[in-house]
Amino acid sequence: MTCIAAKIYKQKVVFAWESAVTQGECLIVDSTPKVITIGSWGPVGGSGVAADIAAGLSMFSSTGNLERLVERIYTNFKGKTSDDDDLDTDWLFFHQGSLVTIEAKGACIKPSSPFWSIGGGSWLALGAMEAGASPKRAVEISCKYHNGCHPPIHILEWDTKKERIIK
């Protein structure tokens, strides 16, 4: 499972995520990339099926084309029902000043708040950020209370004006 939390600040957006990968009942802690940046698109991250995340991020990094990633998500969704087990990957990205999420079942959401979270423990992270926590602290809280999340926590800060990684 993966918890990814993001928050837009005045001149940056911060993404935080934890290190757990689940395969069935097995929890593995590793350094699998879950958030990347490409060009002016800013950060994009995936939570769900590890192979789908890796394939989506690889395709995005090789083409720099978020539209292709979105097209792939909808192509995979087309004709499937909400009962299909393989519809289990959510995406969170920053583009043109907003956070946007595409859920595994096909819903595209642009949250009205300056923060959002996806994945296991996302409800914990959303509540923590609503109470004023940073994305990093929100993911730490998810790790404390959700058995599919595990530290260490990774951070990516994106300069929204210069369109580049801060750290």
Image (spheres, rainbow, N blue to C red):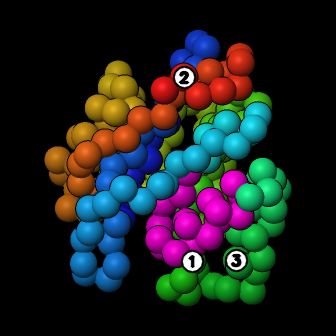
As drawn, the residue found furthest toward the left would be 144
Question: Decide: marks 3, 1 in contact (CB < 8 A)?
Answer: yes
Question: Decide: marks 1, 2 in contact (CB < 8 A)?
Answer: no
As drawn, the residue found furthest toward the top would be 10
Find residue 29 and report its image quarter. Answer: bottom left
Pair 1/2: label in front:
2
Q: Is residue 127 visible?
A: no
Residue at 59%, 56% in the rendered image: 91
The numbered dot on residue 66 is: none
Q: Which residues are magenta?
A: 45-61
Question: Would you call the spot at circle 1 few (<14 residues within 10 Å), some (14-19), or many (20 or more)?
Answer: many
Comes first in the chain, label 1 or label 2: 1
Q: CA distance from mark 3 to mark 1?
A: 7 Å
The numbered dot on residue 77 is: 3
Q: Amino acid at mark 2?
A: Ile
The numbered dot on residue 166 is: 2
13 lies above or below 102? above
Q: Is residue 118 visible?
A: yes
Q: CA distance from mark 1 to mark 2?
A: 33 Å
User: Is residue 53 covered in magenta?
Assistant: yes
Q: Can you say which quadrant of the picture contains the N terminus?
A: bottom left
User: Is residue 113 covered in magenta?
Assistant: no
- Which residue is denoted by mark 1 in the rendering? 87
